[in-house]
Amino acid sequence: MAFCTDIDIVSCYGQLCRHFTLISLSFFFFSSLVFSFYMLRMEVIVKISLDEFLFWFADCYDPLDPNGNISVTFDVNQWTDTGYVARVTIQNYYQYRHVDEPGWKIGWTWAQKEIILSMSGAFATEQGNCTGYRINAHCCKKDPVIVDLMPDAPWENMTEGCCRGGLVSAYAINPAKSFSSFEITVGNLGSKSSEQAPQNLTLLAPGPGYTCGLLEDADPTVSSAIGGRRQVQVFKTWKSTCTYSTFLANKAPVCCVSLSTFYNPTITPCRKCSCGCREADQTAVSCIRQGLPLSQSNFVNSLDIVQCTDHMCPIRVHWHVKNNYMDHWRVKLTVSNYNYKRNYSDWNVVVQHPGFSQKATTYSFNSSVLPSVGFAVGSVSTEILLEKDLKTFTYRNGWGFPRKLYFNGEECEMPLPDTFPMLPNASSSNPQPTNCLLLFLFLIYLTLSPAAS
């Protein structure tokens, strides 16, 4: 469990971003009207894509993790006759977004005629054509693609910080496993050639969504030796920063939220088509109907097959306001996996709610995995006991529900406020919260091993 005490600053920046977006949209709308009127007089038809405009502003700032990124560092620690030996480190600075199965995949384009003579801790997916070099090189491709070794790799192929199958933990959850590294021996530079940083760096972690900057010269990395009594420095360091965009990674949300309470029998389900809609073509199989025995072979080439639901999301998070006490209130949180082809491990849920400014106790999840076994939907749940701030606590106007909720760093689709289960008209004299309430983040995470399918 972790709390974020400076979320008020983060939220302030988020509000500035939204205000800036609204002001810009208003200006854009006015300008487009004038522009369209002018162009129509010239009998020219111009189509302006508002979606493209919204894309740039909607992704301008991440209030959940403003400083998150993945850095890629090349540390040249040895020169050779034809090249150099470097350690490549992939460091995850995202607080709540980890690299899940099937793991990271990194690629680049060589600036000159370099080849990879040998590697430890990782391997190139293709060797390429090495017939012109008269040596048994590891990879001779101009644009190699590198992946991590598995934990059961031979020890002689391992190096420090490698061999987790490409899995990298979120920095706030497990800093010791928030990085991955490997060693690479580069050759074929020639005695008169000067080394240059690789170009066109790409990162899949594990899918698309990451955009990497140029590998640029940085201050040489310094590390300690002899028990910290000596500082040693590499010869050269190239560094790049990769940032994540939900819009590039997902065409639709990957999770949704449903709501219920003890004081209202109404259950607010996930919004219809939260993560997409079913195929209009009835012959196209885009999901599995509950109770329908379909062969797994029908979906062997599909990465994600979900149960047919109105929301069509692989993950649903249900928030239930369970009990009300004199000084406390209790919430039950249930996470359900509707993805038949994936067992989630090392997952986390982040809840944004003003009630977490008070002390909260989270009980253990009643299951250690979030499985998807056969054709049964897997789910786990926990209960959260929160203290009341009697000056601000209320059940009115949906105050007891999350403002935002994230699964593995991805924002989940919330129901519309006018569909929230409401308090009966004659109930509760609790004071309403003020408009200046600070929002606090509450993090629930598990470090799990994948479930057996």
Image: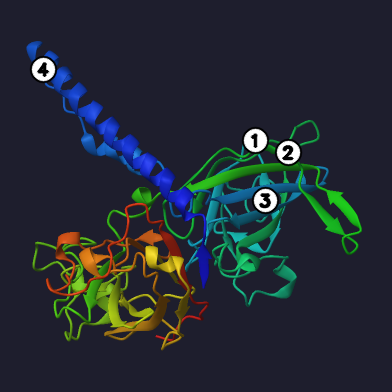
Could you give the CA–CA distance between mark 2 and mark 3, rounded to whole angstroms? Answer: 11 Å
Q: Amino acid at mark 2?
A: Leu
> What residue appears at the point 20 percent right and 82 percent down from the top-left corner?
294
- Does the CB distance between marks 1 and 4 fall below 8 Å? no
Name the element at disc 1.
loop
Give the x, y percent position of residue 386: 41, 76
Structural distance between the alpha carbons of marks 1 and 4: 53 Å
Asked if labels 1 and 3 touch by Cβ distance under 8 angstroms, the answer is: no
Q: Position of residue 153 (x, y in %)?
A: 65, 74
The quarter of the picture where the C terminus appears is bottom left
The answer to whether the residues at label 2 and label 3 have Cβ atoms under 8 Å apart is no
- Residue that carries the numbered disc 2 in the rendered image: 189
Residue 48 or 282: which is nearer the viewer? 48
Q: Going from the N terminus, do you reach mark 1 or mark 4 first?
A: 4
Marker disc for residue 37: 4
Task: Return the disc, 4 or 2, that comes first in the chain's sequence.
Answer: 4
Task: Please tell me whether mark 1 or mark 4 is closer to you in this view.
Answer: 4
The kind of residue tagged 3 is Ile
Are the residues at dot 2 and dot 1 in contact (C-beta closer than 8 Å)? yes
Residue visible at 24% across and 82% down in the picture: 295
